Amino acid sequence: MLTSDVTDLNAALDKAVRGRVRFDTASRAMYSADASNYRRVPIGVVEPVDTDDVEAAVSVCSTYDVPLLPRGAGTSIAGQAVNTAVVLDFTKHLNGITALDPEARTADVQPGLVLDKLRDAGRPHGLTFGPDPSTHNRCTLGGMIGNNACGSHSVAWGKTVDNVHALDVLTYGGERLTLGPGTPQTGRIPTALRDLGNRYAELVRTGFPDLTRRVSGYNLDQLLPENGFDLARALVGTEGTCATILGATVRLVDAPAVRALAVLGFPDAYLAADNVTVVRALGPLTIEGMDAGLIAALRASNPVETASRMLPEGGGWLYVETGGDTRAEAEAAAQAVVTAMKPYTQSALVVSEPKQMKALWRIREDGAGIVTRSPDGGEAWPGWEDAAVPPEKFGAYLREFDALMSRHRRRGVYYGHFGDGCLHVRIDFDFTSKAGIADFRSFMEEGADLVVAHGGSLSGEHGDGVARAELLPRMYPPEIIRAFEEFKGIWDPADRMNPDRVVRPAKMDEDLRVFVGLPTMKDQPMLAFGHDRGSFTRATRRCLGVGKCVTESGGVMCPSFRATGEEMHSTRGRARLLFEMANGQVIKDGWRSPEVAEALDLCLSCKGCKRDCPVGVDMASYKTEFLAQRYKGKVRPASHYAMGALPRWMGLVGKLPARAVDALNAVARSPLAAVAKKLGGITPERSIPPIARLPFTASRRTSPLGSRGRVLLWPDTFTNHFDPSIAVDAVAVLEKLGYSVELPPRAVCCGLTWTSTGQVETAQKVLRRSLRTIAPWLSEGIPVIGLEPSCTAALKADGPELLPDEPLAASLSTGVRTFAEVLAEHADELRDAVVTPGGRALVQVHCHQHAEIGTDADATVMTALGIDAEVLDSGCCGLAGNFGFEKGHYEVSMACAERVLLPAVRAADADVAVLADGFSCRTQLRQAGTREPVHLAQMAATALGLR
């Protein structure tokens, strides 16, 4: 479209629609990709507030003759959720349940409803929605209907098409229809579809594979009289190419009260696949499969991950879920599976404890992201990732598919819905060269022929979109392909609904986002980007769009999205903006881009994405690089000088006499503080934390020679100058355990505050100087113990990124340990030495500890000290170092805290301690007016009678 036409369209939509209309550069960039290999920049985005808005938007688009794309969560893998069109985003407003009838077992839903919200609503009635893709906590019902989604429980409950009762739809031409049993079957569209079904009936009966996981093509079989001429089900899986879904009535199924999981270990994935028919005969709820490669990728990408250690011995596994009215009944059913499968398995176990089951399921659910990157930065992609064959042929298909990959010198890691013969795999296609893309095409064509030879479907779950639609003539005869074209033509004569998808599709090797989006900017990062082969632009490709960051709960990622609900403030949204910045096509200002700056401004640098994102996107590092490049040689924001250089200022304050520090604290409490905060870029709502009269290092003493040898305590800026009593208690506990505690001879710093504000060169100098200071201890293998999680994590993880060529930095990952990691080695001794059991505690885990270190050692220590701990699933506290202090961030900072943390603390009994090892977390709690938080060192000292 011409710029003037787009401007007129934008204005017309603004006038007609009450919801937000977004034609800005950032929105178009963020909606240019889904979770597939493909990229198309949309014309604009509309967020309708109700169905009247949808009708108005469709009318305007029809008047201007522009394509339209109804969109769910944007997690589609075949490219059907991106197009040069006006995007209708239903997730913001049309996202509710309008009715739920437990007796009829149905629910009326809006298209933007997230699946888990429907499942939560059905749970009190013992009901659930059967299809459950691994994206269940962010995928929408409209997207599931458009894609005919399946999920792990299709063995028991079928695909989405099997669970749709009725649809309320709107055509591009403005016709609104209610489809489903008992609805009128007259009018232009039903009459034409009945004629189509009659003419092609025999071809459909003979030309469609007899397969539970056939998702490719349109559901013409639903037009047959033996299937009830069900127009609602016929429209399922059309990928937005026929009509816009305004609402749906879906069927709910009885959910088992209790579930158990039988995990079967086989020597390899082939043997696991060979035996799925035996398991199917036992009537389980699900049969999921994994290959050893998935587990290896998980452990390499997430060193603190522990769930995979529960897996029984093997090189391939089946998850077989069973249900029952009681835990004993569910366990018995799972045990029966183990017993029946004993002749075929290498090992097995039964799990029924909910937390353990959740941890095991997370391995499978995160598979799509885990296998997209190897530890050395190697990339793998979807495309041919979900073909399905009859389960009895699955083992044979898997072996031949492996041979196909070998012929093309490709590698891939398996997982999938083995019970339905559906294989998920990400393959290391080369999308950066024409030769690599030619091989991709050849592989896809041969893969299509292979699956058809086994009586299968090109897609068993993710749809056709761009990735496989071009291959449909290899699966269906020409007459059926013509029938698909007629089917779309009946619904959408103008061919404006998500064009170039399913029928008359775009070429599978066009619009590949890596190739068409190859970077144009110089790739000379200041950080090492060791996991991305030293390339920042390669790092911007790490996000594949699986969308785990756009969830509302669980884990740490992504706190700013959960506070604002804006795509721009999600890890995915920021990653896409950085990708577009690197290629320079939509975002043209490079490091000066206002769109990227706006998106990164509300990034808390919490590092939650580094742990929680299945692909390991590290937005905190990307933000550091962006700030470093943006302000290179330029004046920085005031907060960078004030809070970014905090260790330097505190080093000067530490040399002052106590009375001078008292005076500074008094000023911080006086009206003059407003001036200081304004000069320092600090938001006026924040109080300046009081400084200790004397830093811990000023009162250091010689530690007695311990029987267990020497340790070096890292006196971080926050503990040393704000909470020195924590260090005092830590030393007392370590000495109690027989350690000789030493301190560095001069001030040391990890450089975190400079790193987080993009002052990379200064951070490098600071860290290098600190490493030289502690070199004697590192070289002797003496443990360096950190008390502040952010600093400890920075030493272990950021050090090698800042100083990749510094041998001492490489030794930090093993040489630096947390206080809890040291104590955990003496759990029995601690248990015997407890004088006053720790009591109850709410635990707020620091984000950087969650991301880089984990909390297993902390749990061990708390148990030994008699602490009855409730670890909050609260995400980031919201303060996040300098973030919550910076001007313009206060509201988001407090919104993060008010999601879970602060309400939980207010609701806790008075005798419940609030354990927060991070200074940021403690500061947020203090300034929110809640009770005084404590550090693990303080609780340990109390329990051991040392304070």
Image: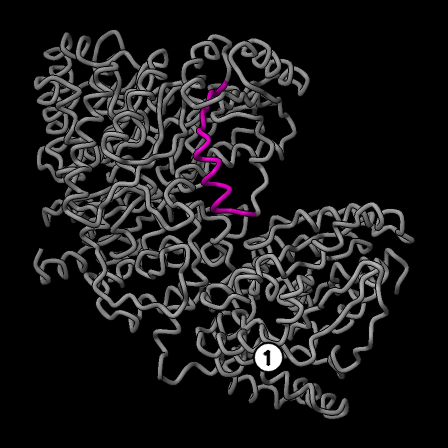
Closer to the camera in the image, 280 or 860: 860
Mark 1 burial class by Cα count in 10 Å: few <14, some 14-19, many 20+: many
State whether residue 686 appears in this view.
no
Closer to the camera in the image, 359 or 341: 341
Look at the numbered disc 1 and give the secondary structure of its residue: helix
82 versus 286 height, above or below: below
648 versus 808 height, above or below: below
Closer to the camera in the image, 893 or 363: 363
Which residue is drawn at the image coordinates 41% and 55% (left, top)? 531
Percent of width and height locating residue 573: 35, 55
The magenta-colored residue range is 285-303
Percent of width and height locating residue 876: 56, 57
Colouring method of the image: one colour
Which residue is drawn at the image coordinates 29% and 58% (left, top)? 579
In the rendered structure, does residue 302 fall within the stretch colored magenta?
Answer: yes
Name the residue beneath numbered marker 1. Answer: 647
Percent of width and height locating residue 137: 46, 39
Which residue is drawn at the image coordinates 52% and 29% (left, top)? 122
Q: Is residue 736 left or right of residue 143?
A: right
Quadrant where the C terminus lies? bottom right
State whether residue 290 appears in this view.
yes
382 versus 160 height, above or below: below
In the rendered structure, does residue 710 fall within the stretch colored magenta?
Answer: no
Q: Is residue 376 left or right of residue 914?
A: left
Q: Is residue 286 left or right of residue 905?
A: left
The residue under label 1 is which amino acid type? Pro
